[in-house]
Amino acid sequence: MDDVLLYGNESEESDKPPSCKPRPVRPWRVAVVANVRGEGTIPGSGPEDAGAEFDKMETIQAIQAAIQSDGHHTVFIPADINLPNNLRDVVPDICFNISEGLGGDGREAQAPALFEMMHIPYTASRVTANAIALDKTLTKRIWRDCGLPVAPFQEFSTGYEQIDPTLRYPMFVKPAREGTGMGMGTQSICYNSRQLRERVHWIIQKYNQPALVEEYLSGREFTVGILGRTDAAGFSLHPEYYQSDGFHRMPVLEVDNDNSITPGVYGHDAKTLVVGEAGVPDFICPAHISASFSRTLQNLAIRGHQAVGALDVSRIDFRCDGEGKPFLLEINSLPGLSPGFSDLCVIANAESVSYRDLILEILYLGASRFGLVEKAIDNQPEIEISLPMPGVKSHRTARVQSRQSLSLRARTQLR
């Protein structure tokens, strides 16, 4: 019998043939694990944008509503120091993870590591991938070694290191282990060594971490959402989304920063604005680019996703140089899921994928990794066709079984 947590008594009757695997008799208890903006402990000496990656309660509630619409039960658990005790008390079947962690290296890996230790299924990337993705310098080193295009870069730990003489100005400076545009603004663009040193020292002191310096790319900026893995179609609620390699190629979104509050930079201030507010960047999806260039970005994104070991969902940012060549900037293994606001949600909406469907795809892909979802099986009615036999006047009748698109253990028992 599958190792599935059940609540209540198991039903002794089933309309499924005995040869098939048993199913859970009750919906899942799903814990949405997240850090909520304005709650929890953030060091008072930290930067002004500390906690910028944390989610609003409205986002948690939207995720819960999407999951509940498919018949599951949900509970919100804050990703704070009480998380271990709360997980033990709630005993979830699976955790829908969007937690950012509470500081330190690889903080986005804190909750997944705890899930692993407690043997609790969860969604999205696993421990190592989340830790790598948060470390922009390490990510770039991996991508570079895999032959993926990244701008020349250098990490500064003290600020006094010799500047690599092969790097060309202008250069861009940002925290090596932050997201949501934290520490990024128009002052991040440095045109000489004095500006570079000042910005590097400011980043190191303000964020208590290394500063990543890379050649500034003056071209267009894009972001690409990734959904799936090699066997995704076999566990998906929408197998038609996925191509033969198991990935869904979402439309490319362009971020036009020319008229934003931080011109030329998709920084923290710009990311706090809502569409329609003054200074918000223009979001164009699908981007006005050729089909060939779109495929190039999508395929580079998939390679970047796989190179760091990300799973099921991610978002990769690109920037082009002055000649239009794309370079990978960074990967978000836990992309924002604020309805109508976060980039991934804007992208999904552009291709008419509802917020509900996006959330449920992430949930079911995660659940399938832990045996909570049964893969597609062939159980369609047989079709009789006649096949000519060589040297024989009559025809042989053959029975051919058509392939059913999907059989989801949990979904079937809920409908």
Image: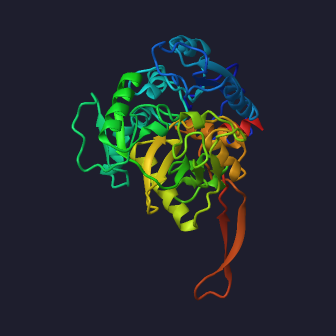
Q: Quadrant of residue 195?
A: top left
Q: Residue at x 72, y 27 (%)?
A: 11
Q: Nearer the viewer, residue 92 or 319?
A: 319
Q: Is residue 374 above or below residue 131?
A: below
Question: The N terminus appears in which quarter of the rendering?
Answer: top right
Q: Is residue 158 above or below residue 173?
A: above
Relative image position of residue 17 (x, y in whole percent): 68, 42
Q: Can the viewer see residue 279 in this picture?
A: yes
In screen coordinates, is 293 left or right of 163? right
Q: Nearer the viewer, residue 12 or 284?
A: 284
Assign the C terminus to one quadrant of the image: top right
Vertical relation: 22 (above or below) 284: above
Residue 12 visible from this viewpoint:
no
Q: Choose between 268 and 194: the one closer to the eye.
A: 194
296 or 87, which is in the foreground? 296
Point out residue 115 in the picture as x, y percentages from the top left corner. 49, 24
Q: Residue at x 44, y 25 (%)?
A: 107
Q: Is residue 93 above or below residue 226?
A: above
The colour scheme is rainbow
Residue 109: image location, x then y, percent = 44, 28
Residue 2 occupies quadrant: top right
Question: Total number of numbered labels?
Answer: 0
Position of residue 161 measured from the top left corner of the image (x, y, whole percent): 23, 34
